[in-house]
Image (cartoon, grey):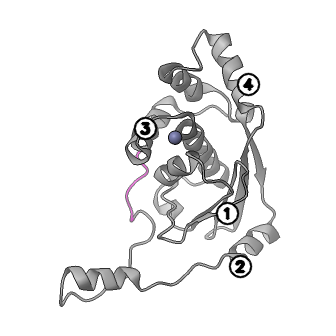
Amino acid sequence: MPVDAATFRHFIKEAIDFHGDLCRGQMIGVRMSLAALKALGIHSRRGMWGLVAFAECEGCLVDALQVVTNCRVGRGTLKVIPGGGRQVTFVDSQTGKGVRIAVRPDCCEEVNRYGRLKGWNAEDDEGQLRIFSEIEDSAFLDLDLLADGEVENLLSRHPRQQSPGCALRQDWLVPGTPPAPCRPEGGDRPLELI
Ligand SMILES: [Zn+2]
């Protein structure tokens, strides 16, 4: 499925701010995350409240994933599992749906091939951005929806920690303020689709 180019560019800008520079990992991470949200039927920040990402990699794409999905280590919604692979499993604990998305081994060849087809340089930033603005998900990603049992299994093996961290932090900052729990993921900000 192609992606909306303006949405892609919007999140790339945020990913550059968060990650520190533009790299192919940011482009793959933004596209992977948008593909996951679509596969899970999530269209708003509120819809992401139950989203948990299990990243079997520590590469650049994990930073872009955080920007798009708002999954965070500190919120307990991003689990980085060492494994050396390039796949992420996204689970929606609200709906029980899950999708595993892997970067295809021939991703770079496909991206380069698409660039040649269009006359865009897959080695320069603007060329790559153009390619990732319109190349099909299936050209560089493999998507597998999880069975119900798999979703429960993953969530029970990685239970969410209940931490008083936010309440404590608020106490430190404003003495006398009653502690409040942290808001659900992203509050109720709309998903800023342009
Ligand atoms: Zn990078």
Question: Which residue has dot 4 on it?
Answer: 109
Give the mark nearest the N terminus, 4 or 2.
4
The residue carrying pointer 2 sits among few (fewer than 14), some (14 to 19) or many (20 or more) residues within 10 Å by Cα, namely few
Residue at left offset 81%, top offset 63%: 147
Q: Which residue is mark 2?
A: 156
- Towards the viewer: 136 or 95: 136
| Chain-order first, disc 4 or disc 1 | 1
**Which residue is tagged 1?**
81
Q: Amino acid at mark 2?
A: Ser
Separation of residues labelled 3 and 1 (CA atoms):
24 Å
**What amino acid type should be assigned to the residue bearing mark 3?**
Asp
Q: Which residues are magenta?
A: 187-194
Measuring from the top left, give residue 152's x and y in whole percent: 74, 74
Q: Position of residue 49 (x, y in %)?
A: 51, 66
Closer mark to the observer between disc 1 and disc 2: 1
- Is 83 on the left-hand or right-hand side of 12? right
Of residue 188 and residue 155, the one placed in the foreground of this image is 155
Mark 3, secondary structure of its residue: loop
**Amino acid of disc 1:** Ile
